Amino acid sequence: MVNISNINNPYIISSKSTQLVSTQPNKDKVEPNCVENKNLIDNYITTQGLYNQPLLKSTKFESNPSGISNYNNYFEKDINGNVLTSVVYSQENGSIIQKVKTTSADGTTVDRTTSNNDSVKQMTILIKDKNGKVLLNKNKSTEKISNDAKKTTVNGEVYNVSGLNSDILSVEHNGEIVNIDLRKMTDEEVGKMSLEFGKNGEEIESFEERKNPITDDERKILYSKVKHLDGDDLFRLSKQIQKLSYLDVPDGALESFYNGENRKLIYSKDVGGLVLSHELGHGVNHNVNTNVGDFNALKSNNEHYQNIYNYEVNNFHKNPTVSSCEKLFDLKFTNVENMMRTGMTREEAEQRVRDENFAESYVVLNCTDILNFDENIHSRALALTKNMPRTLAQVEYLSNQ
């Protein structure tokens, strides 16, 4: 585990270890509008008595080859045979299509469809409560225009990206143009991670500054990850992220961080789109013009967000399954005690799991790449989709504030 006590190390103050300590309660109550009423989800939970909702425990998991690439269809059923989670693949007109359907403990459903081909990536997500009320309806697509340009459309809002063949990207949205000068954003210094194993086989990570500065090849790797992001993500990156840093890691290792103190993304060569999107989600969660130690620095510390998050986490903990992806989800996104083992106080750990949940929700809401849920790092997103649908709707609202 990362030694979080050394907060002066820039490769330790990150999405893994940033300490966000509240010295006072959040007195400025913010009640965002998820759909059309300011307290819609929170009020619904209270008025419908959903905190005491009976839960159906899932007991059966099925997986079979889809016949498309290395993707497997996946089904999870409850004790009555009702499908709680399904992931089904198909192929049509040169596109691979992934359809995900989930039902949470209180009956909230998510329908998420992703379609990828050589020139267009599309994602739609529809979230409804058990009575059919729409909590979120989002459509997003990114189209390749040329090797130098692409266009992202989100619910009719267009983001035009150019400069993909250079180190300066330009994003135009509603007449506003932002430029992302990747070279100016890049740290010349490179962090180096070493990995050892303890007596019980646990991984022990350590970080130091590498003697040699970033190379041209490492720059290309760093920039290629950013260029892969969709136009709306790049637009947010221009507002939220100030620095990029390459991390030198042992072969086969994958590592990434968000450094809240200087709004920096730090990542290694094998980081994919999902992971970078997750780290960007940490940046989006961090309110601009706030100090990293302030309670209100994080949108996920919003009182309304906490109410929704705590409600769904409580339901999840009442309904444990043997699913490996839900175990991974629990350790990273809901398990406060596990976070406290790294040396955090309870308050720090509670803020941390909410921050991690926000960042992973950002992935589910924005990633237009097809996620392979057979991979551990992708499977946790599936567990989050099933168990935290109302939180997803809230993250979408807060991401646009």
Image: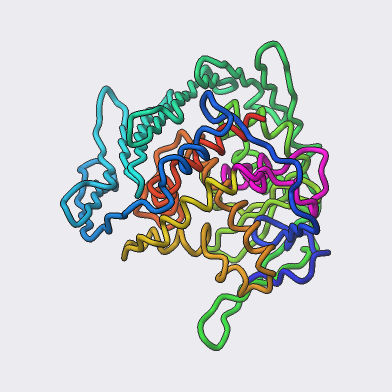
Which sits in the foreground, 348 or 205?
348
Q: Which residues are magenta?
A: 276-304
Which sits in the foreground, 164 or 199?
199
- Say left or right for 392 vs 2: left
- Say left or right for 20 vs 141: right
Residue 263: image quadrant is top right
Residue 380, position as x, y percentages in the image: 44, 54
Q: How many marks?
A: 0
The image quadrant where one finds the N terminus is bottom right
- Figure coloring: rainbow
Q: Would you say residue 279 sits in the magenta stretch?
A: yes
In this rendering, the answer to whether 400 lies above or below 325 is above
Which sits in the foreground, 397 or 26?
26
Residue 95, position as x, y percentages in the image: 32, 28
- Say left or right for 121 vs 158: left
Residue 64, position as x, y percentages in the image: 19, 51
In this rendering, the answer to whether 387 lies above or below 142 is below
Residue sitting at x 20%, y 43%: 67
Residue 148: image quadrant is top right
Residue 158: image quadrant is top right
Which sits in the foreground, 110 or 277?
110
Predominant secondary structure, magenta span: helix
Residue sitting at x 77%, y 63%: 210
Residue sitting at x 68%, y 37%: 30
Residue sitting at x 59%, y 44%: 305
The image quadrant where one finds the C terminus is top right
Looking at the image, which residue sits at the far left? 81
In this rendering, the answer to whether 316 lies above or below 363 is below
Residue 154, position as x, y percentages in the image: 52, 22
Q: Would you say residue 298 sits in the magenta stretch?
A: yes
